[in-house]
Amino acid sequence: MKLKVFGGLWPLTLREAGRDFVAGLTLASMNIPQVLGYTRIAATPVVTGLYTVLLPLVAFALFGSSRHLVVAADSATAAIFSSSLSHMAKPQSQQYMALVGEAALLTAALLLLARVFKLGFLANFLSRTALVGFLTGVGFQVGIAMLGDMMGIEASAHRTLLQIKELVENRWQFDVETLGLSLLVVSAILLGRRFAPRFPVALVAVLATIAASVEFDLEKRGFAVIGPVPGGLPSIKLPEASLSEVVALLPVAASCFVMIIAQSAATSRAYALRRREHVDENADILGLSAANAAAAVSGAFVVNGSPTQTAMAESAGARSQFAQLVFAAVVCIVLLFLTEWLQFLPRCALASIVFTIAIGMIDIKSLGSIFGESRGEFYLAIFTAVSVVFIGVEPGILMAIGLSLIRHVRHSYRPHTLLLAPDRSGRWSPAPASPGLQTEPGLIVYRFGADLFYANEESFVSEVRGLVEGAPTKVRWFVVDAGAITDLDYSAARSLHELLDDLRSQGTQVLFARVSPYLRSDMDRHGITEAIGETRIFARLHEALAATHYEGHEQQAQERP
């Protein structure tokens, strides 16, 4: 495994460094409030949000290859581990933080294995449709979880339905002033996002509410504040967990692993293509592994390549990982000198920032696009979102992967099939394969739209028999257009042998056209080539059709008296 360091940094000119320095300052001003907000989703102390953009940023810049990917706290992965860990230990407790660190360390180990054994393809099983639905569900879940703090109502439950129940039962705690401040912060951030996306509205909101909290002593007026935040750099130590806890954390780490690979790979690839740059996905996986290991030993939680923060970095003018290193330097200064002021931040303001993050996760535009192009995939996305809200985040992502696979298998089990048949002008045109149609008297050209394997072999055999038996004239030649067939398993090969024998006994010859080298290898191995004859297997469709006409003329000549 070849190791290259600072692949996302070099080459870097002095002018580019100056531009990225300014971008890093801008990125810090925009992102620090967000990473503080992510701790509400992660159920960890506020300072851990700052830890996620310190050593993890440096670790990815050191080992990753993407010049644009921002690796930091992420709402999706935070929701994944907090939903499970909150049932194993009390949130923010010492035991909980040990489990959080262990989950990050296990995630780092899985990412390292993915790099060594090139297992990154596993994330491809989470389709983009399911990912949109999953993030939408997380958005609703996180948004509902923030309503309690935004309205001054205590809601300690971790399940969405129970949180709604608590909000209703404790509605007498509702505080108008708390809600008013929350709505002011939400409105300011959403308007800023709409009309001034590069202006750090969230940072201004944090500074303004802290100033108001100090000036008017909001805590005494009934506003809950986040309380003391420890300053200084994080201590470096390995998280401690028992063997049983490690085993229990493996599914959580696996879910985080899938989300990290899926989001990070898609994000780094998109920005590399936009800038016409090369990106080494294996190096990025190693960088993500190092970033999560750094998070684990520095008291942070699982980090991810964030699409939203990467977009913010690009809008700020960042063009290399140098901007992220500047971001980390700013965070270092905040940790050393400014954390004492964070204790005055009203909890409703922090919850409001997270609420706007949750709103951004609900991708109405993508859902509308999916609905317009594929109703089936739209229902898949909605079902995934509902599952996340009502069942939970971790079961939701597993269900998303399962539904994506089921949908793919369903397409392979019932693939599109076509038959070339004459249209009104007499020309051959693709038509749905149905008995009673034929390409021309004595000839059927049939296309099967998937690989042949044990699940669809019966469908293939039944349809071929139906077409031959239902043809208006005796079928002498049956041409299989195998352009979509690249694989043939043992079970399908046995059924194909039986079909060939039956058709041959009826006087129907089978030819295969557009046969790829991969399919030809399978046909040779399973004895299909020998059963058909090498002269009846063709790389192009027109060659197969020419062979049927040539043989037809020969046969007619032999039948003449």
Image (cartoon, helix red, strand yellow):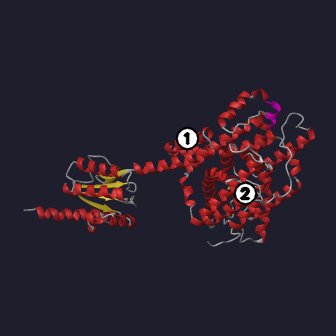
Residue 304 at x, y percent in the picture: 68, 55
**The one of 424 and 442 positioned closer to us in this rendering:** 442
- The residue lying furthest to the front in this view is 243
Work out whether 543 lies above or below 372. Answer: below
186 part of magenta stretch = no
Region in magenta: 174-181
Q: Tell me the residue that label 1 is attached to.
A: 383
Q: Does the image show residue 422?
A: no
Q: Tell me the residue that label 2 is attached to.
A: 296
- Within 10 Å of the Cα at label 1, are there few (<14), some (14-19), or many (20+) other Cα atoms? many
Of the 4 image quadrants, the one containing the N terminus is bottom right
Question: In the rendered view, does 532 fall on the left or right side of 366?
Answer: left
When asked about the image quadrant of residue 11, the answer is bottom right
**The one of 297 and 198 positioned closer to us in this rendering:** 297
Question: In the rendered view, does 403 fall on the left or right side of 391?
Answer: left
Residue 138 at x, y percent in the picture: 65, 44
